[in-house]
Image (cartoon, grey):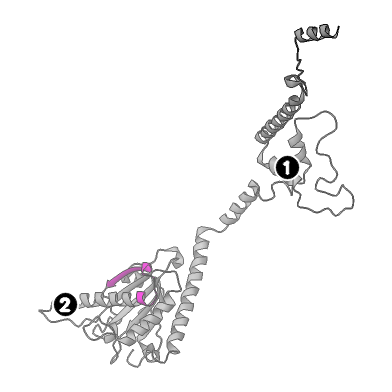
Amino acid sequence: MAEKKTEDTKKRPIIIKKVKKVVGGGHHGGAWKVAYADFVTAMMAFFLLLWLLNVATQEQLNGIADYFRPTLASVSQSGAGGVMGGVSAVTEGAMRTELVNDITDTIPSTIVDDDSQSPDDEEADEQGKKKLSQSEFEKMKAAEEEKNFEDAKKELMSAIENDAQLKELAKNLIVDMTPEGLRIQIVDQQGKSMFPLGSAKMYDETYMLISKVAQVVAKLPNRVSINGHTDSVPYGTNATYNNWDLSSERANASRRALVASGLDAARIANVSGKAEIDPLFPKDTTNPQNRRISIILMRQHPTGGTPAPQNVNQLRETSTNPNYNQPFRARVPADIP
């Protein structure tokens, strides 16, 4: 009997059943829906923010920014002492589309856009500027310029008087005010010339004197005019060199000395030689004091509202000083009438 069961068992096939367990329900589960819903919600909030930024004005945006970033500290112990003062940003009830307007309306006007200036304030400033007319402005600037010239004249005279090496040359310096500007003249005296006779190479003390002038002139913004003058003593009949050449070369030598002493070359308006056509003493054109270098600080704001004169004839015609041809001198030498 046992042998028969063994044979039946050998003939029966062996069947193996594999069971696959699916955890979480596979693709039929709902976990991904939660993540997707969060993503859609975030995108909706983002586009809603973009829409609010697009429809809001700059003033409203400033108000919202100040609301969320308050700069005023609460002085109250309660929660109603902040920027909003306990006022709700929105009204009770359903959501309203006027949210942005409601917020800016409840924020104090001193906080909303406090850095900007209203059109009314700008208009008031413009009206204040127009109260000062152009002529009054020019007069004010001319008076200021005149004071600067006077200060420069005093500074120059003081610097010459306090310099032991240049003190003796004070008699060679003439400083006066003209309609064209502050005029500084370096003149020859009897027995004391600034240049060798007939030469454009200046003496060492002349260079030192011009250097002092440059130090004072460099402090002012005015442009500079340099003119060379000679007496009326002519050169020989067959000479190729004349007073025009001499006065021009002396003026140019003075320009080089001024620039080397610190004056900005861009401030020099013109350099010219006048020969003997503009003598300091018209009744004595051979007087050695007619040989001089004239350095003029030109006015930027002419007095009286008229343009600054450009030549000697205009200077004499427009001058209100009856002693125009007898200007102030640093030290009046004995040989000057």
Q: Which residue is situated farthest in the right direction here?
A: 78
User: Residue 187 location, x and y as percent?
Assistant: 32, 84
Which residue range is magenta in the image?
259-272
Residue 241 is tagged as: 2
CA distance for labels 1 and 2:
84 Å
What amino acid is at disc 1? Ile
Badge 1 marks a residue whose secondary structure is helix
Badge 2 marks a residue whose secondary structure is loop
In the rendered image, residue 269 lying in the magenta stretch gets the answer yes
What amino acid is at disc 2? Tyr
- The answer to whether residue 59 is left or right of residue 313 is right
Give the residue drawn at x 16%, y 81%: 235
- The answer to whether residue 102 is left or right of residue 267 is right
Q: Which residue is disc 1 drawn over? A: 64
Local crowd size for mark 2, using a 10 Å CA cut-off: few (<14), some (14–19), many (≥20) = few
Q: Which of marks 1 and 2 is nearer the N terminus?
A: 1
In the rendered image, residue 42 lying in the magenta stretch gets the answer no
User: Residue 236 location, x and y as percent?
Assistant: 13, 82
Residue 252 is tagged as: none
**Most foreground residue, 81 or 195:** 81
- The answer to whether residue 144 is left or right of residue 197 is right
Local crowd size for mark 1, using a 10 Å CA cut-off: few (<14), some (14–19), many (≥20) = some
User: Residue 3 location, x and y as percent?
Assistant: 82, 8
